[in-house]
Amino acid sequence: MPPLLPLRLCRLWPRNPPSRLLGAAAGQRKVKQMHLNFMDEKDRIITAFYNEARARARANRGILQQERQRLGQRQPPPSEPTQGPEIVPRGAGP
């Protein structure tokens, strides 16, 4: 048991503050570690979703290209675009 402090010092130094400070620092480290673990897990999940979506897009790319080519062969070629009003330079009027 630590030696008892005189009553005057007990009022100035309540309940051994250095141990409370060490406990608070350990608690903060624990909270920080929990936060980092959570963020790492979240990043792993998001990365897995991203990689899965990229793989699906890569797999579907060929199918979509084939479908576009098939549809393009069936449709008649587009007609000549109609020309809209032209801008006439100044001085070149009727």
Image: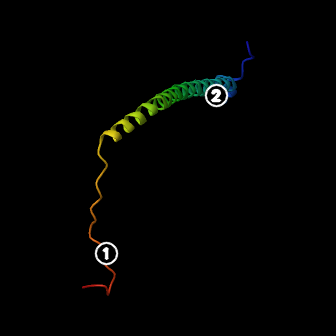
Say which amino acid is labelled 2. Answer: Arg
Q: Is residue 5 above or below residue 79?
A: above
* Residue that protrudes farthest toward the bottom in the picture: 91
Front one among 8 and 30: 30
Image coordinates of residue 47 in percent, x first then y, are 53, 29
Q: Which residue is mark 2?
A: 11
The residue lying at 34 percent from left, 81 percent from top is: 89
* Residue that protrudes farthest toward the top in the picture: 1
Front one among 10 and 82: 82
Image coordinates of residue 62 in percent, x first then y, are 45, 32
Question: Dot 2, crowdedness within 10 Å: few (<14), some or many (≥20)?
Answer: few
Say which amino acid is labelled 1. Answer: Ile
The image quadrant that residue 26 belongs to is top right
Q: Is residue 75 left or right of residue 17?
A: left
Q: Earlier in the sequence, mark 2 or mark 1?
A: 2
Front one among 70 and 17: 70
Question: Dot 1, crowdedness within 10 Å: few (<14), some or many (≥20)?
Answer: few
Q: Secondary structure at mark 2?
A: helix
Q: Are the residues flagged by discs 2 and 1 in contact, CB closer than 8 Å?
A: no
Q: Which residue is mark 1?
A: 87
How many numbered circles does the render carry? 2
Front one among 55 and 23: 55
